[in-house]
Every structure is written in C-alpha cells, then in structure tokens.
Amino acid sequence: MSKPLSGRKPSAKREAILDAAQVVFLDVGYAAASMDGVAARAGVSKATIYAHFTSKDQLFSAVIQRRCERSEAFQSIDSQGDVRAVLTGVARRLMTLLLSPEALAMYRLVVAESLRQPDLARAFYDSGPAAGKAQIAAIMADLADRGELVLDDPWVAADQFIGLLRTDLFMRTLLGLPLRDGQTLDGVTVGAVDVILRAFGPKR
Amino acid sequence: MSKPLSGRKPSAKREAILDAAQVVFLDVGYAAASMDGVAARAGVSKATIYAHFTSKDQLFSAVIQRRCERSEAFQSIDSQGDVRAVLTGVARRLMTLLLSPEALAMYRLVVAESLRQPDLARAFYDSGPAAGKAQIAAIMADLADRGELVLDDPWVAADQFIGLLRTDLFMRTLLGLPLRDGQTLDGVTVGAVDVILRAFGPKR
DNA sequence: GTCTATAAAGCGATAGAC
DNA sequence: GTCTATCGCTTTATAGAC
C-alpha cells in the first residue's frame, strides 16, 4: 500500500530533473540549454541526470512527451445554449490557451526542432492542435445537429474557426512584438465568431 | 562604369559567406550552426568570415535581414475581374508562398530565435506577415470599393482571410508531418474563399 | 543512485604571416 | 583581405569513489 503502484518509477530526483529540464528547455531552447544548467536547477549532479536519461536528446524527448501527456486541452464545454455564446466561449478558451506563455514557448521549441525530432512533432501535434480541433469539431457537429449551424463538414469548419483565431494577434505575441492599439483577445474572438455565424449560420 | 555603384560592397566572398550561412542556418538552426560549417560551405577560412562580420550573431542577423529585404511578397495582383477569381488567385499565391520549404525554414528559425533576437523578429514580421497582410488588405479594399465585398475594415478581413489559409495543412507541413488524405492546397484555398464570400459577399 | 573530477571534443574568436 | 594555426572556454558524456 505504501508502495506506489509503479509500472514506472516516480522517483523524486527523476521528477526534479524533468521539471528543471522543462524550465530550461522552454526558456532558452534545445541547443542553448546545457546539462550543467539543468543539473544546477534540479539540485543534482550531472552524473545523476545521466543515470536516469541516456542523453540530452532523450531527456528533451522525455520532457516534451510528459508535457504532451499532461495537456488536457480545454476540458468539457457544454454545447448547450445560444450558438453565439457557445462559439464565443470556445473561442475565448482556445485563445487564452494559445496565448499562454507556456504554450507559446512550447510551440517555439517544437517548431524549431520538429524536423530533427519527428517523434516530438507528432506527439505535440496529436496532443495539441489535433486534440483541440477534435473537441471543437465535436461541438460544431452538435450545433449542426441542433440546426444552429449548417455545415458540410464539421472538421473543416473547426479548422477554419481555429484559423480565424490564429491571426495577427497570435503572430505578434509569438514573435514577442507589442500589440497594435485596440488589438485585443476579445476583438479577435468576436470577429471570428461573426465570420463563422455569417458563413455557417442558419438564417442566411 | 566598371565600378559597381556601391554604397555597399558586393564583394564576392562576402556574398558567398552570406549564401553559405543562409543554407546552414536555415538547415540546422542558429545554435547548432557552426562558423566552421559556414566557412567550409562558403569555401573560405573562418578568419575571412570574421573579417566581414564581427560575430556569429551579426552574421545571422545579416542573413535574415538580406533575406527579408529580398522578399517581394507576391508581386502585383490585379484586383480586376470576378471576386471569386481574384480571391482565389490571392489565396493560391499566399498558400504557395507559405508552404514553400524556404519560407517554412525561415519561419521555424525566426520563431525559435524571436525572443533572443527581437530585431530579427521585427524585420521578419515587417517584411513577411505585415507586408503580405497590407497587400491583401489593399486588394480587399478595392473589392469593397467596387461593391463586391461588404467590409467594416479591410485590415481585419485580410487578417481573417490569411488565418483561414493557415490551418491544419500549414501546421502539418510546418511540423514535417504527412498530410491527411484529400488534404490539398486547393481544398483549403477554395474553402477559405467560400467562407469569405459567405461572410462578406454582397448578396446575403 | 549519487556524488566529484575529468576526459574528449567542439565551439567562437583571434594572432600573425603573407 | 585571406590564410593557417591556435587560444581559451564550454559542451556532452564518463570513471571511479561512496
């Protein structure tokens, strides 16, 4: 009972190393991160890291994989209620997630390394963009069933909805540039919902 | 006359270095690129590089700046003709540009380094996303003037149009993942134009 | 498992000859 | 301007004591 039911070992040091590595990698990028830096932040010696992970590559991989497994996208959203309200709620949540510093750092890191670490690109895509799109497609399919939207393909519509949210505001934030005057999360959200409703709303 | 009208010197070696550096940086990323590697590819010695550029940082900066200056976005598109045809032409050009291997490599690189090199992020943004958006906004404003579109703000509409093009297809290509069956440039293009026309077309 | 100490290699940048 | 050769430092990874 006191024994943790471990298929895997949740060794405290191992977790500390992963936590530290996540901070360092997300902060300075893969190449610029050093094992010394990770060791210092984790409060262990470098040799201890190599007792748990065979290489820097594998440590990096473990960090991203763990991060992907933990991401729950955005939890249950009920698709009940006014179409506009539902879509606005979804959009606001997605925008908040996309613009969070951690998600942006993760995106920068994975995009940069995607060609050299295809497994990570896949893990990120599946647990991030693909999972989010699936949730939104399900909601839009619900709305279509209720006659609140008229859709050929909810997956395509979800894709387009997300695209309408990842616009200039996202790009500027991603690049660390200041926002334009009047460029707000709510503005983009409302604009995207307006377009979707005009394109797919029932009363045309 | 034989003398090139140089405010700047188009020294052959200098150009060779810049060409080589561009290939290396876009290929392996900033941190993983080595001055030895650039020197080897350029066919010069490392010392020669440092005769032309003060540091690795500055060489990198020069590469990106030059690349940004040369990008002409997409040259003149006439906004004459059928609305759908104009929008489709614009969309197809932008998609082709966005999905080109060089543009993707550039995007990966700049995104990864944006926080550590804010000047580059700015240069990239101005000559890439911002320039493209300006051209598309101008075209959409033309269409609105002709009564072919009904727009509150052509800049917002251009932003949304671009967002509708940077969807899952772009993400998968960016991450080096295979495309889904039936996921095509033309499909995304047509879908985006459809949404824009339904949202902003005159006959609602 | 965890540490200290160190090996082995690669890096950015420079000196000095030509 | 361009080269060869090298400095001084940091890096990943490992040996060996405990």
Image: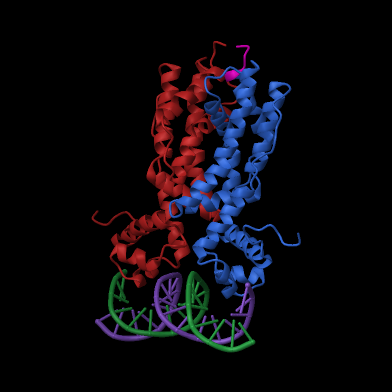
Chain colours: A red, B blue, C green, D purple
Label count reads: 0
Name the residue nearer the viewer: A84 or B154: B154
Task: Place residue A26 in its image quadrant.
Answer: bottom left
Name the residue nearer the viewer: A141 or A107: A107
Above/below status of B65 relative to D17: above
Q: Position of residue B100 (x, y in %)?
A: 66, 46
Task: Place residue B79 in its image quadrant.
Answer: top right
Quick check: C9 left or right of B178? left
Q: Position of residue A130 (x, y in %)?
A: 52, 39
Q: Main secondary structure of the magenta part?
A: loop
**Which residue does the image show at 60% across and 62% down from the upper left?**
B21
Name the residue nearer the viewer: A161 or B40: B40
> Does residue A85 appear in this view?
yes
Residue extending farthest to the right is B2
Name the residue nearer the viewer: B89 or D15: B89
Q: Position of residue A155 (x, y in %)?
A: 56, 30
Above/below status of B152 relative to A16: above
Quick check: A156 left or right of B43? left
Q: Quadrant of the C terminus of chain A?
A: top right
Please say whether residue A5 is one of the residues in the magenta stretch.
no
**Which residue does the image show at 64% across and 27% down from the upper left?**
B139
Above/below status of A194 relative to A164: above
Please say whether residue B200 is one of the residues in the magenta stretch.
yes
**Which residue does the image show at 54% across and 53% down from the upper left?**
B109
Q: Position of residue A8 (x, y in %)?
A: 37, 57
Range shown magenta: B199-204
